Structure formats: C-alpha cells, structure tokens
Image: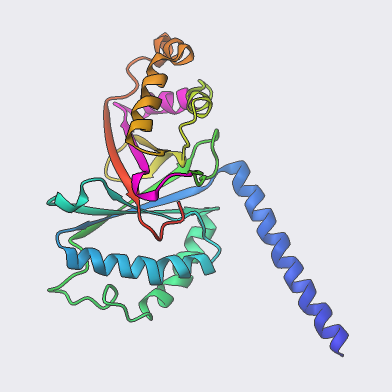
Amino acid sequence: MKKIFFSSILSILLSVLIYNQAAAEAAAKSGYYYEIKVYHISSSSQEASIDSFLQYRFVPIMHTADINNIGIFKPIGNDTATDKKVYVFTPYKSLKQWESVNRETTDKLDATGSGYTNAAFDKPAYVRMETIFLKAFEKMPSAAAPTFTGSRAERVYELRSYESASEKIFRNKVEMFNKGGEVDIFNRLGFNAVFYAKVLFGAKMPNLMYMTSFENMTSRDEHWKAFGNDPAWKKLSAMPEYQNNVAHIDIVFLRSTNYSDL
C-alpha cells in the first residue's frame, strides 16, 4: 500500500514538473506578458505602507505562485518629488497564468491583514494606481535579471516609453526593434536589458516600453554615447522605411528596492 501511495505522489510531482516545463517552453516561444503597476503616493507613510505590503506580502505570495523576476523600483529623486511613485514589474508566462494567479492570490493578499489592505477610505495607502499591460518582443520573449558586481544603491534602471503617431507607424517601430536589429545593437553594446515589450493596455497608446540597466549613471551615459556613435545604429536609423516612427519619448531613471528580484 505504501509503495502505491508513494508511486502516486511521485507521478503527481512528475506531472507538475512536466507541466511547468512545458509552460516555460511555450512562454519562451510565444513571449511573456508583463504587468507594470505604478503607485502614486504623496507621503512617507503611504510609501512605508506600500513597501511593507510588497516586501512581506506581495512578493512572497507571488513567489509561492511560481512568479519570479519581480521588479520593485522607485524613481531617482523620488524623495523630493510631489508625486512620488513606486513601480511594480511582474512577468507572467501566459494570459492564463496571469488570470489564475490573480484569482488565487487575491484572497491570500486580502487575508494578510496589512495596513495596505485594510487602509481606511480617508487614509488610503496610495493616491492612485495605474496599470500597464504588455507583451514581450519576439527578440526577447522573457525578462532577464541583470548581473552586476557594484552596489545596488548605484545601479540605474532606465525605463523608456516610445509613443507613435498611429498603430501602423507603431508596428513599424516594433519591427525596427525586432527584424530591423535594434535589439541586437543593444545586446552587442551590453545594455543589460530587463525587457522589451509592446503595450497592450495603458493610458498612452500606441506605445512600446523597454528597460535597460547599468552599474551607475556614468556607465549609462557611456553606453548611450557608444550607441549613438555605433555604425550599425547609424545605418539602421537612416533607413527610409524607419523614419518618423516615434512621436514622443518618456524616460524614467529608477533604483531597485532592496527586496526586488531585479
């Protein structure tokens, strides 16, 4: 009887491992989905509440649900900003995983009894929250955690948002990154990209976003200088088919928190 019981357990564990492996392989082919939540806050008490919730509730529960490479970031100069922000980057292997994880973790997060979860209506944990939902580029179908040797406090994560004048022009810019070889140039020059993705739902459309990372701000400036002088980039950016495909660029410099996976 014991042999049958343990055999059944082993069969179940093997099935789970096979399923997870198959899901990972499918995601690697079709591309991950990313969710970026941006908390807008106005006080240090709100920031402390969100930090506590994310570090001790959200990240551990998501790890239990097999969601890794979660990035928690704050803009450089956040302390002096009127509209303080906290960025939460979460990758999902598929829409099905996003749906199931959100359904299964909602009750767990609500049950934690944190100050964030149980904040009163007149003392909210944040001013407002926005959500951006993205789909990974084919050239980089999953997010990557950069490897650095320097201090975390000096690291710079650069989040860029490229808006286009129309959907057709937007698709042209996405093609420039993928088939055109822009991602390849970034890779060759060591930009330590965390992700490249097109925005599926968000306040600014049509739009793509990507994040690169550097040891420090000096390294960041050196990398972008090398990019601007790179012969392959000069050739690509001069091609007639890729002209005027970006209407507006937003750049945010971020630091990762000490409890961030990235």
Residue stretch in magenta:
149-177
Tell me residue 116's x, y (percent).
27, 72
Q: Residue at x 38, y 41 (%)?
A: 199
4 part of magenta stretch:
no
Dividing the picture into quadrants, the one containing residue 249 is top left
Q: Tell me the residue at 55%/33% (across/down).
A: 139
Q: Residue at x 79, y 72 (%)?
A: 11
The x, y position of residue 1, in whole percent, is: 87, 90
Along the viewing direction, whichever of 257 and 38 lies nearer the viewer: 257
**Residue 167 placed where, x, y %?**
36, 30
Q: Position of residue 69 (x, y in %)?
A: 49, 54
> Is residue 229 or residue 249 the one in the foreground?
229
> Is residue 125 found left or right of 218 in the rendered image?
left
Using residue 86 as the reference point, say whether residue 33 is left or right of it. right
Looking at the image, residue 152 lies above or below residue 51: above
Is residue 175 inside the magenta stretch?
yes
Relative to 185, residue 6 above or below:
below
Tell me the quarter of the picture where residue 169 sits: top left
Residue drawn at 48 percent across, 49 percent down: 33
